[in-house]
Amino acid sequence: MNDEDKHSSSLEPQSTSLDEFEFIASLRQHTPCNADDLVLGIGDDAAIIRNKPHHETVVTTDLLVEDVDFRRSTTPVLLLGHKSLAVSLSDIAAMGARPRWTIISVGLPEEVWRSDFLHEFYDGLLELAQYYGVQLVGGDTSRTDSKIVINSTVIGECHAGRAIRRSGAKPGDQVFVTGSLGASGGGLRLIERGVHLAGQNFTESETQLLDHLLLRHLRPEPRVGWGMVLGQEQLATAMIDLSDGLSSDLNHLCSESSVGALISSTQLPVDTHVVELCGRRALDPLQLALHGGEDFELLFTVRPENVVKLPRRVDGVEIVRIGEIVDAANGVKISEGAKVWDLRPGGWKHF
């Protein structure tokens, strides 16, 4: 998106006296109903979508709660809008589907409503939606007592029978992961230690390092392209996005598939910035890669005969083989040289 496009698609700040329906009317101007299969978008009691023959609908929803999933004081509003959509796009990607439509509901304290929060929030969200050709077709707004609450729903589609589930892995399948691991967890550790984006008393190299890690947490990039390729070409037997952390999500996949796994710690694509950060701040890069969470990479399995069919990269993002699926009796394990130990779930838990 060029600067001219950004300007034309952004929501202009309005009077603080804007009510809910005036805001919806303003938002509607920036989300025209311009798709052949979208019969009716924002403006009525519900959107109307025309189903395609021989396709299936894939639906996901995510809830972001202030002081649980993000902090208002450390999360730029534009990036919060981006992330609110990105986390649901990642789920659609993990099903091997194409994201098409989104529904966003937001609960706000009155003082936040009276600010420019929603305009900045939707600017960030709509920029990402435009990039992936996703149409905002509805949602809701309400008042909360003190915390911001965001619900993001994304509707996608895939050819009938081609959605990739967590339950299709078999012994002998090879385990792959997109991109790199640990940067989001490293970014969260920085935020918890009071580090903010740019403008601090760091050297230029330190600022670049810190901003990279912070943005991997605050502005995740869902692997939509990889998800669509793996689904359309039927290359993956099982897949999950890495939202809770590799250790937890690999265990989720293996549980659903009734298999075990053996991965190699030396093959994990730990983000190079994480290695540098950990060397300076007494953190363990392997722990961040395994348990850090919110990398939003894709973890997937492939039959041995299909490995040669995998592209080297999609949208500039490479993949790395990290291990193999084994019998369930062997459990989920990780190796480092001759040493092998159980890989227990150590990622994010809400409760």
Image (cartoon, rainbow, N blue to C red):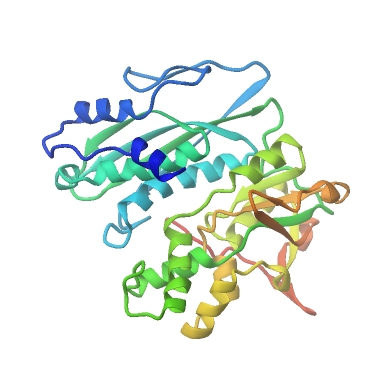
In the picture as drawn, the residue positioned furthest to the front comes out as 4
Q: Position of residue 153 (x, y in %)?
A: 44, 35
As drawn, 283 above or below 199: below
> How many marks on residues?
0
Question: Image point 15% across, 33% down: which residue?
Answer: 18
Q: Quadrant of residue 179?
A: bottom right
Q: Position of residue 148 (x, y in %)?
A: 27, 48
In the picture as drawn, the residue positioned furthest to the right comes out as 305
Q: Is 57 displayed left or right of 101 in the figure?
A: right
Question: Image point 23% across, 43% down: which residue?
Answer: 108
Q: Position of residue 245 (x, y in %)?
A: 56, 60
Q: Quadrant of the C terminus?
A: bottom left
Q: Is 148 displayed left or right of 244 in the figure?
A: left
Q: Position of residue 150 (x, y in %)?
A: 34, 43
Question: Image point 50% across, 40% down: which residue?
Answer: 131
The residue nearer to you, when weighing 198 against 138, is: 198
